[in-house]
Structures are given as structure tokens and as C-alpha cells.
Image (cartoon, helix red, strand yellow):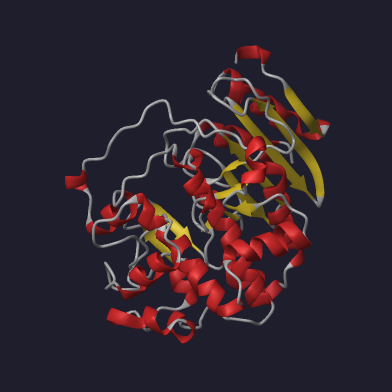
Amino acid sequence: MGTNVLISGHCDERFAAVREAFEENFTRRGDIGAAVSLIFAGETVVDLRGGWRDAARTGPWEADTVVNLWSTTKGVGAICFAMLADRGLMSYEDRVADYWPAFGANGKDQVTIGMLLSHQAGLSGFDTPAAVGDLLAGATAADRLAAQAPLWEPGSGSGYHAISIGILATALFERIEGRSLKAFVRDEIAGTLGLDIALGLAPADDGRRAEIIAPPELSSADIGQLTAPQIAALANPPLDPLLPNDPAWRAADLASANGHSNAAALARLYAHFYRGVGKDALAMATQARIEGVDLVLGLPARWAAGFLLNSDGIYGPNEAAFGHSGWGGSFAFADPAADLAMSYTMNRMGTLLRDDPRNLALIGAAYASL
């Protein structure tokens, strides 16, 4: 590692501070392999990559390297729903049960699509014991969640649906559009837009996949101190950070956590979205639907329809910024007020739930360069 990490790609001189911060992520902040991309005023001004795809440091991180995104995947799913709204196929005020009658069981009949995507449905996870295989069970998992009673009154607060939102979202999406989210991303995001983004990863692409590397320290939460919504979301079952290295994980359709991409493709997706989608659809997708202390995260959060909205400067200084971050440190966001889109992907996971020092350095350098 150290100062011998090879950084490749390009960086406009106006954004030299971003390159410096990216280099320091390797020399000072523990990165092993990573990429960062910044699109400003429609122009790619930063597209850098460096380090290694694997913990043994045998394969360099290349331009086409992809890595599991964890919850940065959720922003991709949110953009897909916004595309449906832009096409007039749905409204965020539509009730989920109008498309999926079984979802209305146990008092969930008034949950709207906007409420579901903003983590208000009370289904932050299974309420009976579950294994990792249950998270990857597709329609079976969706039916199980749809039949559950909510863990809190829907609409009364947000509780981060860490994994379950991906299970529910793709089941709902298919009932609206006809394709699963995985198929839609394959056809329209990777296909029509030509962006290197996928839910899961095809075995043919395994040779360019970066290995996920666990955080240097993992503290196990005291289950006795967790609330029911937190247990459902975070501990039933407990998530192993190395799950993305398992082929079964990569084969699933999980729009909450198993997206695979790189910084360049994600920045391009966000830039295309805020610059290309209809103004009304953008406003509806990114309006705040609930804010306050999240029942699962235990932190203040502002949720839109699948996006995390900027607060406390996590995505720079402008309130209009929206995006999503992933467990371990990845992020992708857009800031229409500054006319920029930015993403960072990496394989060595960090330990902080938010304010990862690598993120702060890159985003701070980007805005300092404007």
C-alpha cells in the first residue's frame, strides 16, 4: 500500500484536490482498492481508480472493475421507480395494495409506494427467525413480508428497511412494470443507457469483481439492547460483511444491497437522472417524505422515495443533494443546485455508519474545487 499505490484515470486540474484526497485515502485512510468519479456541468472532471481488487494485492483495480455496493444499490432502485413515475406507470401516492393486494394484510392497506420507499411501512425485516437464505428467496421472501403485521404503525416514523426494502421493492416493481428490478436494470440501465450497473453479478463477470474486505474492527451489537425494528433489520439474521464474496449472494435480485458497479457508472447514472428525467418526476422522487430519528438507525435521517436526502453535510453543503451510501463506505449522489454527480466505490469496508473519513475527504475536496 503506502505511497506505491498506482492511481490511474484522469482528473481535471480544477479538481486536483479530489485526486489528492483520493491518494490520501490509500496512504492515510486504509483504502486497498477504490474508484472515484465526479461529473460537473455534464462533464466528467474526475475519473480515478487505484489499488487492488483483492486483499492479497494480486489484481490491480481496473477501469472495468466492479464491486458490491451494499446500500448504495438503493439509489439505483429509487431511480428505476422514478423512471416509472416519469412514464406515467405509477404515482408515489398509489397504495402498494392496489398493485399487490396481499400486501394490505394486517393493517398495511393504506401504505403508499412513497411510504414504502421511505422506510415507513413497518417491515424493516422478518418478525420470525430468518437465515441468510431467506433474504435471497425472492418471491417467497416477499410473500412472507407482505403477510406480516407491521412492527410500528405505518406512517408514524421511518425505520430503515436495510435488506427488506430490496425484497419488497422488486416484488412491487414487477407487479407495476412487468419486469423485476434486476431485469429492468439489465435492460434499461445497462442496456439502453450503456452503464456498467447490475443487480447481482453474472458469473461471466466474476473475473473483474473486486473482493469485499471486512472492516478492520467489527463490534457485535448487544441484541438485548436492540428494539424489535432494529433486530428485524440488522440482526435477523446477522449480516456477514463478506457475504458479497458468496456466489449465492451475487445470484440474487436484491435491490437493497447486492448491486455491482463502479464509481464512473454510478456518477453517470445520477447525472443522467437529474439532468434527463422530467422536472415533476424529479421533484416527486426527491421530496422529503419523512424526517426525524430513524427507528432502526437511531440517527436523524431525511428520506425521500428511496433516496437519502442531504443533512448535516453528508453530501456537501446544498440541501438539494440526494443519493445513497452503502455499508462500509461507498456512496453515490447528485446535487442539482451545484450541477454535479459524484460516486466512490471501494472494497475495504470501513466501520462507521456515517461520516466515513474517506467520504468526507473526497466530498469536501470536490466542493472546495468548485
The residue closer to the viewer here, 79 or 99, is: 99
Residue 59 location, quadrant: top right
| Picture coordinates of residue 161, whole percent (x, y) | 40, 59
Q: Which residue is at a point 82% across and 31% down the rendered structure image?
A: 13
Residue 135 in the image: x percent, y percent?
Answer: 39, 56
**Quadrant where the N terminus lies?**
top right
Residue 50 left/right relative to 135: right
Instruction: Determine which quarter of the picture holds residue 168.
Output: bottom left
Q: Is residue 230 visible?
A: yes
The answer to whether residue 312 is visible is no
Residue 201 position in % (x across, y down): 60, 48
Between residue 317 and residue 145, name the one nearer to us: 145
Give how far across and how far down residue 108 sits, in percent.
Answer: 34, 79
Query: In which quarter of the view is residue 11 placed?
Result: top right
Q: Identify the residue at image location x=33%, y=68%.
A: 122
Vertical comparison of 272 with 169: above or below: above
Instruction: Residue lying at the far top in this picture: please name it.
Output: 3
Q: Is residue 175 above or below residue 222?
A: below
**In this rendering, would 126 be left or right of 278?**
left
Please identify the quadrant where the C terminus is shown: top right
- Number of marks in picture: 0
Side of 321 relative to 190 (left or right): left
* Relative horizontal placement of residue 243, taking residue 344 as reference (left or right): left
